[in-house]
Image (cartoon, helix red, strand yellow):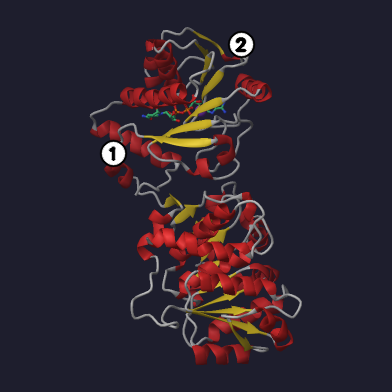
Amino acid sequence: MPFELLLPDEMAACDRRAIATGPFDGYQFMQRAGAAVAAIVLERFPAASRVDVLCGPGNNGGDGYVVAELLRRSGVDVAVYAEGPPRDGSDAALAAADCKVWPQPLAAFAPSAGGLVVDAVYGAGLARPVGGAARRAMESVRTAGVPVVAVDLPSGVSGATGEILGETFQAAVTVTFVRKKPGHLLQPGRTACGEVVVADIGIGEDIVAAAGATCFENGPELWKSRFPRPAVDSHKYSRGHVAVFSGAASATGAARLSALAAARAGAGAVTLLSPSEALAANAAHLTSIMLRKADTREEALAFFADRRPAAFVYGPGLDASAETGRLLFELIDRLPRPLPAVVDASALTSLAAEPGLLAGPFGGRAADLVITPHEGEFGRLFPDLRKIPSKLERARRAADRVEATVVYKGPDTVIAAPDGRAAINANGTPWLATAGSGDVLSGIVAGFLAQGMPGFEAACAGVWIHAEAARRFGPGLIAEDIPGELPAVLRDLLD
Ligand SMILES: NC(=O)C1=CN([C@@H]2O[C@H](COP(=O)(O)OP(=O)(O)OC[C@H]3O[C@@H](n4cnc5c(N)ncnc54)[C@H](O)[C@@H]3O)[C@@H](O)[C@H]2O)[C@@H](O)CC1
Ligand SMILES: [K+]
């Protein structure tokens, strides 16, 4: 699977296994990595008047010596600045010995106008916050605005978490090897990387597979085998019926956005369950979406028994008081059969107000439960997880705790399943930061759940398609525009 993201220890295991099985040794892999970076430098920055290669003491620095020597042989004006010599006997020491560019101390480096910096200071081995000469180099490059090509990761970015430890370079291009790492997609690392190029250095697919990665970059490859496609003999209910709970008279729009999105995602029928005081407001704005009065839990349960929806959305526009969360549990416990559901927005705030409700497994009660907290809601729901520095790890712990798929939203949305799988989404756009876009996402995910997609796949597909629709629309996007963009995105996926 080309979408695996390798954690640093998984990447190190791949390196070790590849070296042990041959035919390449560690230095040959380093030469291939350096050659890939040098090729990008020559291709992307042919007009650079000079290239300064900054080398650290480990193998990332080793890649840097290979880059410097290859650029020298290509006739580039190249200088090497080193933060100490590589360890004797290491692959990096071999690379330094083969490099004919004499290294100067990193402390003597100053960026030159019209030049380019190759950042080979730290990569996967980053062990502590960046300081000293490396930090000063980063600050001076940032001030001078000189472009940077980063080797593996911008030095200072954690490959595991995307955190910046101390300081980093803002790269124009980051060349990594074999597969991306979570830190290339998680913020703020993703921004520091610029464009990410993945270079093949000859580590085989079988070796990557043996690493057993459980984190992926979200994309159609991950879920298209489970993607719903209507059968020739489908009727509207067999395509999946979604129920969406509406808020009170002054808060009905959120649920309607969800309902419309569920329909556009392919649910054959969608019903809005509305308090009587909001029926008129809802009726005035609905055409293909059905409307049913539900003032009480009993009325909602009667609808579920009678019309047997395949999934429901609970949260957008609802009251954030503790009663909303209690009602959800009563509903789930009394449903005629476990149903997939998306729990979002005010329902999450409500559940956080009464932590006891979430103390035990939540999803164990529903078939496929998906919760979609943004940063604030996540922090309120799982206050003890806030101290974990990795967003990926926070999402995984939350999914394990509540036994539900967690869509932890943001510019780097993480989707985590209770079985340990996780995906990081990277096709988002800042145009999605607009009121109501989360309500649309809930509806899309519910639409896929109702069509039989399992929770993790439905959530991953929903997040990617939602972002793709917004990206295609671009400037001026408001939540109402997203459902209308879905048909074109779906057509491309189903073709
Ligand atoms: N076979 C392999 O293992 C390959 C490794 N490759 C390169 O090797 C890199 C990993 O090499 P290493 O494991 O040697 O790690 P690094 O080169 O990233 O860094 C390790 C060294 O930096 C020091 N260090 C870490 N953080 C520091 C900080 N904040 N301040 C000061 N010193 C610090 C460590 O003490 C150690 O000496 C990858 O990122 C990649 O660029 C590539 O050559 C491809 C093949
Ligand atoms: K680097």
Name the side, left or right, on which 34 lies relative to 384. Answer: left
Q: Nearer the viewer, residue 442 or 494?
A: 494
Which of the pair 15/259 is nearer the observer? 259
Q: Earlier in the sequence, mark 2 or mark 1?
A: 2
Task: Report how far apart the C-alphas of labels 2 and 1 lie in the structure.
Answer: 40 Å
Out of 279 and 284, give the one closest to the viewer.
Answer: 284
Q: Is mark 1 within 8 Å of ligand 1?
A: no
Tell me, for residue 204, which label it has, or none. 1
Position in image of residue 119 (x %, y %): 52, 24
Q: Is residue 278 above or below residue 28?
A: below
The image's mark for residue 108 is 2
Does 116 sit above or below residue 354? above
Q: Residue at x 52, y 63 (%)?
A: 486
Which amino acid does the dot numbered 1 rest on? Gly
Local SS, label 2:
helix
Which amino acid type is shown beneath numbered disc 2? Ala
Compared to 110, does 234 lie above or below?
Answer: below
Quarter placement of the C terminus: bottom left
Q: Splitting the image into 4 quarters, where does residue 249 fall?
A: bottom right
Whether residue 155 can be seen here: yes
The one of 261 and 58 positioned closer to us in this rendering: 261
Q: Residue at x 54, y 35 (%)?
A: 193
Residue 250, position in %: x, y? 76, 77
Mark count: 2
Please state the horizontal and vertical placement of residue 370, each as a whole percent of the image: 53, 68
Q: Is residue 433 left or right of residue 99?
A: right
Residue count near mark 1 (Cα–Cα under 10 Å), binned few <14, some 14–19, many ≥20: few
Disc 1 on helix, strand or loop? Answer: loop
